[in-house]
Image (cartoon, coloured by chain):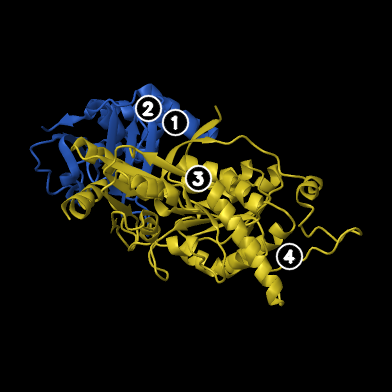
Chain colours: A blue, B yellow
């Protein structure tokens, strides 16, 4: 199994850390992983994206022009990456701020209203975990228990008290996923 | 099994330095390699192993601090990105001229000049053909994974002390910035001054002993005849490296009709291109030089028996292609594909280039 994913949105949304948690979860189930961020003069409010690959085999290129899954968190990213989803692939987006919805008919499209859900719960920082939960419902490539193990491994001990809150957000995302087509 | 982590290439360079018993790191921040010194400052190895970590006032200062440390037999290193390495080239030439070991890391970005902060491979000439002045060569290692960023720090030190010549790790912004699974090396203790004296006492500047001449570490020699002898000694080392230190990886080359030659991140992108080409029934292979100097000339020449064409894939206008052409020696065609200025080629583009430049052309 190889899953090639692009996660794209605004800087500050937790795009890069979502990718990192996903990569760590892959390691927890003995997979090969790669994580390559866009880096540059980008900052909070600018665009940010990361390519994450999880595979049972040695990963060749960390840089891709086509993806199995695109996780899209703003309009610019949708414009940029919709065409780059492989036919039969998956596109997951948060409708917040999206004025032009995806138009492809040869891919699976899912929606997660994560910005609103996170705000309604008064925990805007769990936004990216809600999105990740939704993605794992659409494509269960890593087990929730491995996400938990990944968080335990990657976070310093003093932050471990945050893990239950993040796992709850993940489960909430799983529940709230909407299948568009 | 060692310590398994998910880390950036740059962070791994720092961790590998601490673990291999490095005595000192001297650097100056520059994107896309600032995480090397950031990680070292965060790790505070001076409390753990006694390793010195110093932010110098410039790249010129860093390389000259290395000259000093290496003169006393210490394992010293620096890292920078393209414009910073240009500033260091004088010092690198001096180190080669004074026969001093040390590891220099270049996490390449697009040029010329200040250029861009995005990844590039346009410093191949600078790394392999001198860069600085005079007839010298560096041992040039080209990692293509985060794991090799770990492994090549230790290997770089080993080779640079074996030949008493600086070693350069030539990598790029992709390998520096990306995270992969890495198995970190076991800790090796730093050498004590007594151990250094025992191992390298013959050449280091460790204080004049009554039974020997002073050891003066310099690249200056005013008597031409003596300097010619020095040069002959350097050249003999470079020939020995060419004989014993060539490293490469050949992927599906045995039956390959079309061979891509690529190093660093381009080799990863090209590896995917080989898979895509094979799916289309095209017999493609990848020859990845791991050492850029010494270059795997002989291996490439052997591949001309079967190959109908070679494609040098580099993120530059075509620099390594000159060494590929020398290796192929006119037996078949050699073409180049690359993006410049910080643009990263994609596997699809490499597939198209093989079809258009080698098969169609």
Give the residue displayed 34% in from the left and 43% down from the top.
B286
Q: Mark 2 or 4, which is nearer the eye?
A: 4
Task: Give the numbered dot on residue B217.
Answer: 4
Mark 1 and mark 2 in contact? Answer it, CB < 8 Å: yes
For residue B19, side relative to residue A139 (left or right): right
Q: CA distance from mark 4 to mark 3?
A: 30 Å
As helix, strand or loop, the secondary structure at mark 1 comes to helix
The residue that mark 1 highlights is A151
Q: Nearer the viewer, residue A112 or B99?
A: B99
Q: Nearer the viewer, residue B245 or A41?
A: B245
As helix, strand or loop, the secondary structure at mark 4 comes to loop
Q: CA distance from mark 1 to mark 2?
A: 10 Å
Task: Give the numbered dot on residue A167.
Answer: 2
Q: Earlier in the sequence, mark 1 or mark 2?
A: 1
Q: Give the quadrant of the C terminus of chain B.
A: bottom left
Give the residue displayed 58% in from the left and 47% down from the top.
B42
For residue A48, side relative to residue B37 (left or right): left
The residue that mark 3 highlights is B149
As helix, strand or loop, the secondary structure at mark 2 comes to helix
């Amino acid at each position: 199994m190889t899953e090639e994913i692009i996660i794209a949105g605004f800087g500050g949304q937790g795009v890069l850390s979502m990718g990192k948690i996903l990569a760590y979860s892959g390691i927890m189930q003995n997979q090969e992983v790669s994580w390559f961020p866009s880096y540059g003069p980008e900052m909070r409010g600018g665009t940010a994206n990361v390519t994450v690959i999880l595979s049972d085999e040695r990963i060749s290129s960390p840089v891709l022009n086509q993806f199995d899954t695109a996780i899209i968190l703003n309009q610019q990213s949708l414009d940029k990456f919709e065409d780059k989803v492989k036919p039969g692939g998956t596109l997951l987006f948060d409708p917040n701020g999206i004025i032009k919805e995806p138009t492809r008919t040869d891919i699976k499209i899912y929606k997660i209203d994560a910005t609103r859900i996170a705000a309604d719960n008064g925990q805007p920082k769990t936004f990216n975990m809600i999105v990740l939960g939704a993605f794992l419902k659409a494509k269960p490539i890593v087990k929730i228990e491995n996400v938990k193990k990944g968080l335990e491994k990657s976070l310093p001990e003093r932050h471990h008290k945050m893990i239950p809150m993040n796992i709850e957000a993940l489960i909430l995302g799983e529940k709230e996923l909407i299948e568009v087509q | 099994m060692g310590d398994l982590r998910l880390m950036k290439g740059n962070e791994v360079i720092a961790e590998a330095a601490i673990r291999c018993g490095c005595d000192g790191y001297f650097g100056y921040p520059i994107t896309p390699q600032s995480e090397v010194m950031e990680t070292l400052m965060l790790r505070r190895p001076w409390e753990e192993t006694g390793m010195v970590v110093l932010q110098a006032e410039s790249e010129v200062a860093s390389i000259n601090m290395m000259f000093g440390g290496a003169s006393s037999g210490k394992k010293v290193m620096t890292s920078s990105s393209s414009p910073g390495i240009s500033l260091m080239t004088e010092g690198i030439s001096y180190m080669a001229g004074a026969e001093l070991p040390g590891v220099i890391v270049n996490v390449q970005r697009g040029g010329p000049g200040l250029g861009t902060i995005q990844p590039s491979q346009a410093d191949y000439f600078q790394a392999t053909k001198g860069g600085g002045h005079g007839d010298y060569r560096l041992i040039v290692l080209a990692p293509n994974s985060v794991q090799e960023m770990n492994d090549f720090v230790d290997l770089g030190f080993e080779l640079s002390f074996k030949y008493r010549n600086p070693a350069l790790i030539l990598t790029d912004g992709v390998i520096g910035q990306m995270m992969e699974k890495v198995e970190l090396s076991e800790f090796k203790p730093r050498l004590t001054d007594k151990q250094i004296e025992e191992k390298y006492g013959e050449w280091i500047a460790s204080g004049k002993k009554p039974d020997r001449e002073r050891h003066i570490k310099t690249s200056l020699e005013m008597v031409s005849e003596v300097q010619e002898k020095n040069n002959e000694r350097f050249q003999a080392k470079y020939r020995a490296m060419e004989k014993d230190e060539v490293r490469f990886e050949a992927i599906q080359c045995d039956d390959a009709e079309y061979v891509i030659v690529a190093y660093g991140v381009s080799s990863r992108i090209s590896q995917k291109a080989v898979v895509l080409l094979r799916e289309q029934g095209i017999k493609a292979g990848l020859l990845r030089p791991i050492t850029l100097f010494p270059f795997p000339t002989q291996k490439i020449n052997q591949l001309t028996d079967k190959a109908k064409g070679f494609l040098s894939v580099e993120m530059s206008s075509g620099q390594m292609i000159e060494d590929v052409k020398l290796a192929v020696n006119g037996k078949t065609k050699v073409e180049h594909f690359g993006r410049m200025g910080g643009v990263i080629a994609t596997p699809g583009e490499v597939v198209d280039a093989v079809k258009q430049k080698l098969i169609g052309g």
